[in-house]
Image (tube, coloured by chain):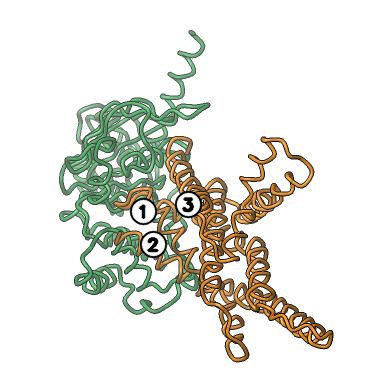
């Protein structure tokens, strides 16, 4: 456990010692800020229109603003997370520092978990920027906290999955661009897999759609924690990290 | 301290290390000598548990590299060919990180970091970012990293490569100062380095060990005859030559280009004859000025070239036979 924290701590320092942490946080803040503005502006306009029309049905901030916003944050994450994960192992393999880690008294799992946890913390810092915008809603309304929390839980799980995949891909190459690009491609594919069910209702299509990382996020943004989705994300994270550990071990055999 | 038996490393297409065996005692400094690509790095990587051997066993500090890798790793300090440094970190925070990885208790980390900084003379750059250090300093930080947990065994892969002569000398002195407490294996392709800092030499060529011996023994490897350089001032060359040829035990006298006004020769003795005292006596007796009298041992370089060449010859002939 101590070793995991040591590696995680060094990863955090590496992110914050380079411009990448600040760049990613700024980019995310900018994009999310725009989404936030659009969503609230649209909400205000729709609210005015319904009042003018004489209808007085209450509109939910959670449903109209927060749920779509968190969904968008997930999509932005899809683009940004490969930028976080790409350096994890590729950089160490290129610079030779991997030799230090692999000749220190650590086991492979400690290295993998430490790296992933470091990247995860970086992702949480980025995600925290969005909480500023979401928190602002409390100045003017009273959103329901529970779906917001489950939504963030969903984002964390989804990000963790993409990071686990990215960690694995990073461990297979010395080239950060390849690691980032391949992670992005794989995650984009995993995202759009859900489209299959829209034109095909065969059981295999449902099975393919089940593999999509996005379909499992939706319930979270509506405030539902479904065991099925939880299991999907946790399994995917475990699988990604397991493959990373194997890939690290194979470095020894293939050299 | 280190015991290697029948160690072999086979890659998909070639065999990098073929069935090597050697032993290193406690406190010894052993030079691992070979051309580039001879299998030095591969052997060191197997000893540090970075690569598993295909065959054979290696025992480091009493632990087996295959069965007990964690124990082995605790007992070695390893400096790879390129020092494993994170350029964005400060020297001290890098060393603290390595100290934690090596399992040093939190309370002792600061003390250990200070100690190794002192030892490797990097205390004054402790707060510098590693990426901004010169190559020589980076190498020292790499060495500090290997020393941080005070391991009984040090494995240094080309510790002086890429340094300027001054830095090389410093690095050699530093390594020499570590002997005694630590058992050291260092690899190099610079022969003078081995002569200066190692007690024992392992010459490896094409994945095989071709010689394991002390530096002194390697020097005397070829025959028992000796070669002596003689320089005499102010006397015509032929006179000196005539005198030298008369001395018992002298086999050949070859003139060399000497300084102006001197007669200079390379004198080779017959086997089992020591000729230097006789030469000195003869020249002084004649009343000449002896300006130089020096035995030229066979340089390690020649031994090395011969050993690695003959090995290739053997390999070629066996291939031809097959």
Please name the residue that numbered disc 2 is placed on: A7
Please name the residue that numbered disc 3 is placed on: A234
Report, in whole angstroms, how far the alpha carbon at label 1 lies from the one at label 3: 18 Å
Residue B286: x and y, percent? 24, 46
**Going 36% across and 53% down the picture, which residue do you hit?**
A110
Q: Nearer the viewer, residue B244 or B144?
A: B144
Q: Nearer the viewer, mark 3 or mark 2?
A: 3
Q: Are marks 2 and 1 in contact (CB under 8 Å)?
A: yes
Q: Chain of mark 1?
A: A
Q: Judge whether A126 appears above or below A49 on screen.
A: above
Report, in whole angstroms, how far the alpha carbon at label 2 lies from the one at label 1: 8 Å
**Mark 1 or mark 2, which is nearer the start of the sequence?**
2
Residue A208 is at least partly visible in this image = yes
**Going 83% across and 88% down the picture, which residue do you hit?**
A52
Report, in whole angstroms, how far the alpha carbon at label 3 lies from the one at label 2: 22 Å
Q: Nearer the viewer, residue B186 or A75?
A: A75
Q: Which dot marks residue B294?
A: none
Classify mark 1: helix, strand or loop.
Answer: helix
Chain (orange)? A
Q: Chain of mark 2?
A: A
Please name the residue that numbered disc 1 is placed on: A110
Residue B319: x and y, percent? 49, 14
Residue A27: x and y, percent? 66, 75
Q: Judge whether B120 appears above or below A139 on screen.
A: above
Q: Chain of mark 3?
A: A
**Mark 2 or mark 3, which is nearer the start of the sequence?**
2
Q: Nearer the viewer, residue B266 or B99?
A: B99
**Going 34% across and 73% down the picture, which residue do you hit?**
B122
Task: State which quadrant residue B305 falls in.
Answer: top left
Classify mark 2: helix, strand or loop.
Answer: helix
**Mark 3 or mark 1, which is nearer the start of the sequence?**
1
In the picture provided, is B175 more to the left or to the right than A193?
left
């Amino acid at each position: 456990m101590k070793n995991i924290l040591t590696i995680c701590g060094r990863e955090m320092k590496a992110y914050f010692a380079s411009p990448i942490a600040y760049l990613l946080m700024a980019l995310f803040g900018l994009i999310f800020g725009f989404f936030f503005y659009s969503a609230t502006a649209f909400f205000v306009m729709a609210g005015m229109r319904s009042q003018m029309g004489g209808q007085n049905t209450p509109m939910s901030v959670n449903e109209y603003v927060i749920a779509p916003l968190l969904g968008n944050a997930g999509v932005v994450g899809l683009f940004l997370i490969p930028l976080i994960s790409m350096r994890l192992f590729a950089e160490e393999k290129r610079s030779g520092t991997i030799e230090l880690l692999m000749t220190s008294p650590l086991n492979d799992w400690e290295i993998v978990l430490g790296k992933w946890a470091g990247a995860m913390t970086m992702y949480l810092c980025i995600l925290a920027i969005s909480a500023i915008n979401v928190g602002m809603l409390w100045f003017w309304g009273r959103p329901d906290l529970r779906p917001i929390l489950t939504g963030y839980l969903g984002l964390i799980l989804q990000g963790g999955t993409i990071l686990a995949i990215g960690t694995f891909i990073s461990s297979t190459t010395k080239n950060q661009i390849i690691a980032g690009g391949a992670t992005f491609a794989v995650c984009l594919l995993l995202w759009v897999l859900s489209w299959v069910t829209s034109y095909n209702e065969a059981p295999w299509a449902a099975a393919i759609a089940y593999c999509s990382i996005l379909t499992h996020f939706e319930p979270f943004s509506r405030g539902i924690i479904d065991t099925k989705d939880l299991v999907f994300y946790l399994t995917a994270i475990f699988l990604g990290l397991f493959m990373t550990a194997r890939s690290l071990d194979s470095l020894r055999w293939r050299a | 301290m280190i015991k290697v038996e029948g160690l072999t490393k086979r890659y998909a297409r070639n065999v990098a290390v073929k069935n090597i065996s050697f032993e290193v005692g406690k406190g010894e400094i052993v030079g691992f000598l070979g051309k580039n690509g001879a299998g030095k790095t591969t052997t060191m990587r197997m000893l540090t548990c970075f690569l598993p051997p295909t065959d054979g066993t290696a025992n480091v500090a009493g632990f087996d590299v295959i069965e007990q890798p964690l124990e082995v790793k605790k007992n070695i300090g390893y400096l790879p060919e390129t020092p494993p440094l994170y350029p964005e970190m400060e020297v001290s925070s890098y060393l603290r990180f390595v100290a934690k990885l090596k399992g040093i208790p939190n309370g002792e980390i600061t003390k250990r970091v200070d100690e190794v900084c002192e030892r490797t003379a990097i205390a004054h750059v402790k707060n510098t970012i590693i990426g901004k250090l010169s190559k020589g300093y980076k190498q020292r930080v790499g060495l500090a990293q290997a020393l941080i947990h005070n391991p009984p065994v040090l494995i240094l892969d080309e510790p002086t490569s890429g340094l300027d002569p001054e830095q090389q000398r410093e690095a050699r002195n530093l390594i020499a100062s570590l002997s005694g407490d630590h058992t050291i294996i260092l690899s190099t392709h610079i022969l003078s380095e081995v002569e200066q800092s190692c007690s024992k030499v392992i010459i490896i060529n094409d994945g095989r060990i071709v010689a394991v011996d002390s530096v002194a023994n390697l020097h005397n490897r070829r025959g028992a005859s000796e070669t002596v350089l003689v320089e005499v001032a102010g006397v015509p060359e032929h006179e000196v030559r005539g005198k030298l040829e008369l001395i018992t035990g002298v086999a050949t006298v070859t003139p060399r280009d000497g300084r102006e006004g001197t007669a200079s020769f390379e004198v080779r003795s017959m086997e089992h004859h020591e000729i230097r005292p006789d030469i000195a006596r003869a020249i002084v007796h004649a009343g000449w000025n002896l300006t130089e009298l020096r035995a030229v041992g066979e340089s390690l370089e020649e031994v090395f070239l011969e050993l690695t060449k003959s090995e290739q010859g053997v390999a070629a002939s066996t291939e031809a036979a097959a």
